[in-house]
Image (tube, coloured by chain):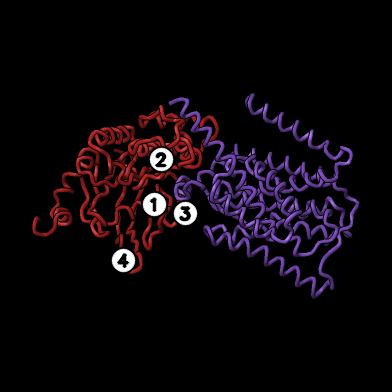
Chain colours: A red, B purple
C-alpha cells in the first residue's frame, strides 16, 4: 500500500431538504488501497459514491483527487480526472455491442483512446474480467454476472486513478460470488485504488485493507475490517442496542 | 477505408451522377418537380435524423430554420448576390440553432418538442407582424432566373453533403458519444462525455442544413409569405418521413422520403382539403405499427431469419 493519498473527503455533507444523508464525513484513500465503505441500509453509502463521482454535489465540504478539488464539478470532469464507477443497478448501453460498451470507458474517460487502439484496449479489459469471447455479442445475450463484468470492464477501460464499486457483488449466486471476489482481489493485487460499497461481509473481511463504517451519514468507525467490525458502536448500528 | 466502404462510396457517386442527368431529359418537368420535392425532403429528413436519431429529441423546429433561410433570400435578393444569401442563410440557421440549443437542450422530452414547435410559430408571428407594420405587404417576391434544374442540382449537392457529414460524424468520437447519450445519459456523463455540447453540435448541423434548403428552394416559390415559409406542416412531414424510413441508419430517412412524397402528391391532388387530417393519420399509423421505421423492421426481420438459420 502506498503512502500517497489519492482521494480525500473533508467534512463532506449532503442534505436533501431537511434530511441529512451525509454528515461531515471525512476519510482518505491511499494509493493501491482497497477501502470498504460499509454501514446498514440507508446509511448514506451510495450517496457518498454519488458525491465522489459527481452525480450529486455536496452541500458542504470538499473532495480532492490528488491535489485537485473535484467536489461540485460535473461528472464528466471527474471521470476525465480519473474516477470511474459501476452502478448499484447495472447500467449497460443496450443498443451497443459488448465491446462498444467497454469502449465507452476507453474513449471518453481518463484514458481517451480512439480507433483501433480503443478497440484493442477494450478487448483487453474484456479478457481481464474473463469474458473476452463475448466481445461482438449484443448486451441482451448476457447473464446478470456477465453484465456486471461488462460494467467493470467499462470502468477499468478508462484506467482510473480511483475505482468506485457500488455493491458490485450484490445479487450474485455463491459460485459467481467466489469468482467475483477473486476478480476484485486480482484488481487489488494489480495495484488498483478501489472504494467498495458492499454488504457481503465475507468479501469485506477477505478483500478490504481498511473499512469506513457509516451510520445515518456519520462515520462511526474506521480501521482494518476486523477492528471496525468488532467496534461496539458498529455492532449497535447493525444489530440494535440489546445485542451490543 | 476498407474495400467494402470504398465500393459503397463509388456506388453512391454513380447514383448521384445519374440523378444529376435527370434535368437533361426531355419533357421531364413533372418528374423534375417531383424530384425536387424528394431531394428537398431527403436533405431535411436526413439532417433531422442526424440529431434526433441518436438523441431521441424530437425537434419540430425544421420549419423555423427552413423559413429563416427562405426569408433571408427573399429579403435580400435585390441587394446581395444569390450565393452570398445562401451562405448567410446557413450561418443564420446555425446561429439560431445554437441559441435555441443552449436554451432548450437541457429540457427533456416533451418540453423540448413543445418549445421547438412554438419557436417556428413565434418566428412566423414576428415576421407577419413586422411585415404588416413596416413593409406594408404580407409577403415578398423572389424573382430570379434560377430554374428548377438549378434548384435540383443544388439540392442534390446538399444531399451529397448531408450524407458525407453524417458518414463522418458516425465514424467520429462525436458519433460514438451520441450513441451512448441516446442509450443512457447518466452513463455518458460518468464516462466523461459532455452531452450538452455533443447534442448542440448536431442540432446546429441540422439547423444549418434546414436553413440552406430554405434558401435554395426560395426561388421556386416566386412569392413567399410567412404561412408558407414557416408552415408547421413541414416540420411534421419531416419527422414522419424520417420515422417511416428509420433513423438508426444514415440512409433510413431516404427510404421514408420517397414513398411518402409520392403518396403526398396523390393526397394533395385528390384530397386537397384533408391533407392535415391525413398527415395526422399517417403519423399515428407509423408510430404505432413501425416504430423503428421500414429499415429497422427489415433489419430485425433479417436478424430473426439469420437466427432461425443458425438455430
Looking at the image, tell me whether mark 3 or mark 4 is earlier in sequence order: 4
- State the CA–CA distance, disc 2 to disc 1: 20 Å
Answer above or below: position of A64 versus A116: below
Task: Tell me, for residue A155, which label it has, or none.
Answer: 2
Looking at the image, tell me whether mark 2 or mark 3 is earlier in sequence order: 3
Q: Nearer the viewer, mark 1 or mark 4?
A: 4
Residue, disc 4? A19
Q: Residues within 10 Å of mark 1 (few under 14, many from 20)?
A: some
Mark 2: secondary structure: helix
Tell me which residue sits at (73%, 42%) in the image. B159
Tell me which residue sits at (41%, 27%) in the image. A133
Q: Between B183 and A140, which is closer to the camera in this rendering?
A: A140
Q: Nearer the viewer, mark 2 or mark 1?
A: 2
- State the CA–CA distance, disc 1 to disc 4: 25 Å
**A151 relative position to B290: left or right:** left
- State the CA–CA distance, disc 4 to disc 2: 31 Å
Looking at the image, tell me whether mark 2 or mark 1 is earlier in sequence order: 1
Discs 1 and 3 share one subunit: yes
- State the CA–CA distance, disc 3 to disc 4: 23 Å
Residue, disc 3? A74
Mark 3: secondary structure: loop
Label 4 marks a residue whose chain is A
Looking at the image, tell me whether mark 1 or mark 3 is earlier in sequence order: 1
Amino acid at each position: 500500500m502506498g503512502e500517497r493519498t489519492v482521494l480525500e473527503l473533508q467534512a463532506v455533507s449532503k442534505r436533501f431538504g431537511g434530511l441529512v444523508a451525509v454528515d461531515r464525513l471525512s476519510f482518505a484513500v491511499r494509493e493501491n488501497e482497497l477501502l470498504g465503505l460499509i454501514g446498514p441500509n440507508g446509511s448514506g453509502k451510495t450517496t457518498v459514491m454519488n458525491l465522489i463521482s459527481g452525480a450529486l454535489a455536496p452541500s458542504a465540504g470538499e473532495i480532492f483527487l490528488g491535489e485537485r478539488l473535484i467536489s461540485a464539478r460535473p461528472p464528466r470532469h471527474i471521470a476525465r480526472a480519473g474516477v470511474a464507477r459501476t452502478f448499484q443497478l447495472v447500467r449497460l448501453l443496450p443498443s451497443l455491442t459488448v465491446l462498444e460498451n467497454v469502449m465507452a470507458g476507453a474513449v471518453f474517460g481518463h484514458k481517451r483512446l480512439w480507433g483501433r487502439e480503443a478497440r484493442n484496449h477494450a478487448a483487453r479489459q474484456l479478457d481481464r474480467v474473463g469474458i473476452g469471447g463475448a466481445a461482438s455479442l449484443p448486451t441482451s445475450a448476457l447473464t446478470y454476472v456477465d453484465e456486471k463484468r461488462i460494467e467493470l470492464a467499462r470502468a477499468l477501460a478508462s484506467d482510473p486513478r480511483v475505482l468506485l464499486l457500488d455493491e458490485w457483488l450484490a445479487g450474485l449466486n455463491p459460485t459467481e460470488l467466489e469468482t467475483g471476489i477473486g476478480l476484485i482481489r486480482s484488481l487489488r493485487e494489480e495495484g488498483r485504488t478501489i472504494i467498495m460499497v458492499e454488504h457481503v461481509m465475507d468479501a469485506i473481511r477477505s478483500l478490504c485493507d481498511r473499512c469506513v463504517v457509516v451510520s445515518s451519514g456519520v462515520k462511526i468507525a474506521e480501521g482494518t475490517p476486523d477492528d471496525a467490525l468488532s467496534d461496539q458502536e458498529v455492532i449497535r448500528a447493525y444489530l440494535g442496542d440489546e445485542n451490543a | 477505408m476498407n474495400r467494402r466502404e470504398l465500393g459503397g462510396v463509388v456506388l453512391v457517386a454513380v447514383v448521384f451522377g445519374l440523378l444529376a442527368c435527370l434535368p437533361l431529359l426531355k419533357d421531364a418537368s413533372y418528374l423534375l418537380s417531383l424530384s425536387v420535392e424528394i431531394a428537398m425532403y431527403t436533405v431535411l429528413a436526413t439532417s433531422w435524423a442526424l440529431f434526433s436519431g441518436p438523441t431521441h429529441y424530437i425537434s419540430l423546429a425544421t420549419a423555423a430554420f427552413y423559413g429563416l433561410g427562405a426569408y433571408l433570400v427573399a429579403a435580400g435578393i435585390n441587394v446581395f448576390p444569390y450565393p452570398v444569401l445562401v451562405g448567410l442563410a446557413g450561418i443564420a440557421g446555425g446561429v439560431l440553432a445554437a441559441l435555441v440549443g443552449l436554451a432548450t437542450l437541457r429540457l427533456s422530452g416533451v418540453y423540448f418538442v413543445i418549445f421547438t414547435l412554438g419557436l417556428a410559430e413565434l418566428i412566423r408571428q414576428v415576421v407577419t407582424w413586422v411585415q404588416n407594420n413596416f413593409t406594408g405587404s404580407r409577403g415578398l417576391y423572389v424573382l430570379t432566373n434560377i430554374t428548377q434544374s438549378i434548384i435540383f442540382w443544388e439540392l442534390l449537392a446538399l444531399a451529397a453533403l448531408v450524407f458525407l457529414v453524417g458518414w463522418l460524424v458516425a465514424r467520429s468520437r462525436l458519433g460514438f458519444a451520441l450513441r451512448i447519450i441516446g442509450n443512457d445519459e447518466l452513463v455518458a456523463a460518468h464516462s466523461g462525455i459532455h452531452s450538452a455540447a455533443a447534442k448542440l453540435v448536431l442540432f446546429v448541423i441540422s439547423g444549418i442544413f434546414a436553413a440552406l434548403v430554405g434558401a435554395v428552394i426560395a426561388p421556386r416559390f416566386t412569392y413567399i409569405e410567412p404561412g408558407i415559409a414557416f408552415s408547421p406542416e413541414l416540420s411534421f412531414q419531416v419527422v414522419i418521413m424520417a420515422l417511416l424510413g428509420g433513423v438508426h441508419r444514415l440512409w433510413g430517412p431516404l427510404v421514408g422520403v420517397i414513398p411518402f412524397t409520392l403518396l403526398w402528391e396523390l393526397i394533395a391532388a385528390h384530397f386537397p382539403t384533408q391533407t392535415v387530417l391525413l398527415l395526422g393519420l399517417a403519423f399515428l399509423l407509423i408510430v404505432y405499427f413501425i416504430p423503428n421505421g421500414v429499415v429497422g423492421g427489415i433489419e430485425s426481420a433479417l436478424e430473426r431469419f439469420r437466427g432461425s438459420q443458425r438455430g
